[in-house]
Image (cartoon, rainbow, N blue to C red):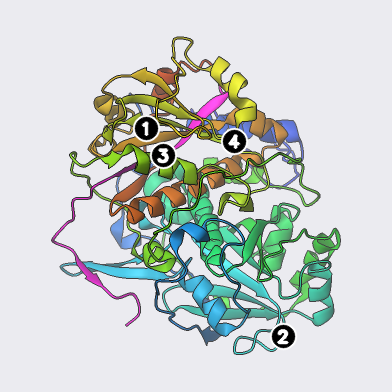
Amino acid sequence: MGILDRFRKRKPGPDTPGETGLSFSDPTTCRRVVHAYHQQTKHGLHRYAAGPMGLDWANQPDPFRTWGGAERVPLEVVLPSDEPKYGPSLSRGMVPRHDLDRQSISRLFFDSFSLSAWKQAGEARWALRVNPSSGNLHPTEAYLLAPPIEGVSEHPVVAHYAPREHCLELRAQVPDELWGSLTLGLPAGSFFIALTSIHWREAWKYGERAYRYCQHDAGHGIAALAIAAGGMGWSVDLCDQIGTEDLARLVGVWAEEGPDAETPDCLLLVCPSGEGGILDASAAAAAAQFPALEWKGRSNDLSREHEEWDAIDLAARASVRPSGPDSHGEWERTPRTAPLPQETPGLRRIIRQRRSAVALDGKAGISARAFYGILENVMPRAGRVPFDTLPWSPRLHLAIFVHRVEGLEPGLYWLQRDEARKDALRAACRPEFLWARPADCPSDLPLSLLFPSDLKQTASQVSCNQDIAADGAFSLGMIADFDRSVEEGAWFYPRLFWEAGAIGQVLYLEAEVLGLRGTGIGCYFDDAVHSILALRDTTLQSLYHFTLGQPVEDERLTTLEPYE
């Protein structure tokens, strides 16, 4: 019997107590459910989280959601160019602004959620996308809520992005007055991208741990959008004032039911003016009117059969965020003092060539300068894309297994992404750690050596005995300030994974810039990682692993163009 069993009800409802007296309107109960879900879905040295006994390939979910009957608007395939450069695109305000039109909307989706290639091996053929996904299963769906755009719609519109066809499916027209209420006080030309998740796509392969992976993917999606928009001089801000249920109304999925249904994740405000903005209190009231719109299209069925994983449903229901002012508070973002690199490749070539490494050669390393540059770009500096999209203070820090970094002693290192939490987090870790600063480390990069040693075997073991974690220049675990975050609300739980996905997205691109390759690792032994750090409770929790190095290409695979 799993530890979540005591929370299950025979007749679940958003507010209806069941035989256990459980109510998801009680914040304390929601936090308990989230903690229980996280504990139950840990992989351990002697057991894995519950999952399917085997993969039913004939019943694999369709990776492409479509809304049959909705009008389709084709978007342009905007080929990559050498401008803008990758480096400046990671700093808000460093790239000239594009106008909002059909071509720029086409470019935004092409650079964030479109197909990047097709792969073929024998008779098997599958698509890769710009935004990475656990197991290439792609639970994340993207929606556009926009004012009239010539060549797209004469009216404000809600549209679903279909990556296979690179088109928009127009789901509903929004009256001008209602659009005005939703965007009251925002800069002219502002629009929204909303993300949802189809949990079944991940659960088909990963079982009850899939909710974690869906939230990783949402974080990758947030970062992919923010970086693509940064390359157009646009700003992206997370609208945490819109709650989960109101977001479902905004994108037309409030009535969807069953395993193929979409669960709302987040609403992102895109400002072509580059100024950013904050939603007015009237936005939630406007969202309540969206179900009355004339919605077009019917969602396609993804699988003939489904296996239920009620642990996922419990976690999702406990993580529902109500609409209202965000409670994150103000925090001081440290400015970047290091100059931007003078020579960087074109942004769009990098984001479209991104791939997940399947194997690394176990030989190649990187210079200390390159290593420090990577870490600098995952720091949440003022104006740093994509981390300026997230309104909360940094909650994730990096425990890094350094294997092959020239001039740097192999061992376990720590990158402190929020220095205000330095003392509290050090107190939670092993007292024997050195916390020594590397001799040539830049003065404003908060990197410490904890324990010098060859830890390649350890890195592999804690990442589910995967060689790839030892064969790169370095691998790492993203360690979350867990209890403090969930105490703010159970709805913060998925946001921790969003931040992890955003870090992972930057690491992917940093690898490509160096001519290397990275890969996210969702399979790791949670408490084995915690044991290395000597964590005694859930103050800190490992949420995501990553590795970077020289890839070993599979010559059996053929690469085809994404849009012929």
Whichever of labels 2 and 3 marks the residue nearer the N terminus, that label is: 2
Crowd around label 1: few <14 · some 14–19 · many ≥20 (10 Å): some
SS class of the residue under badge 1? Answer: loop
Say which residue label 4 marks: 395
x, y (%) of residue 190?
71, 71
- The span from disc 4 to disc 3 (Cα, nearest Å) is 20 Å
Q: Residue at x 52, y 66 (%)?
A: 231
Which amino acid lies under the numbered mark 4 shown in the image of this protein?
Answer: Arg
Q: Amino acid at mark 1?
A: Tyr
Which kind of residue does numbered mark 3 sit on?
Tyr
From the viewer's perspective, is the residue at label 1 or at label 2 nearer?
A: 2
> Is label 1 or label 4 in front?
4
- Give the Cα distance between marks 2 and 4: 40 Å
Q: Is residue 196 left or right of residue 177?
A: left
Q: Secondary structure at mark 3?
A: helix
Residue under pointer 1: 48
Q: CA distance from mark 1 to mark 2?
A: 50 Å
Q: Secondary structure at mark 4?
A: loop
What is the number of the mark on residue 155? 2
- The numbered mark, 2 or 4, whose residue comes first in the sequence reads 2
- The residue indicated by pointer 3 is 372
Closer mark to the observer between disc 1 and disc 3: 3
- Name the amino acid type tagged 2: His
Quarter-of-image position of residue 11:
top right
Q: Residues within 10 Å of mark 3 (few under 14, many from 20)?
A: some
Distance between the alpha carbons at the discs numbered 1 and 4: 26 Å
Magenta stretch contains residue 546 = yes
Residue segment shown in magenta: 538-564
Give the x, y percent position of residue 55: 30, 51
Q: Looking at the image, is 523 positioned above or below residue 552? A: above
Q: Quadrant of the C terminus?
A: bottom left
432 relative position to 173: left or right = left
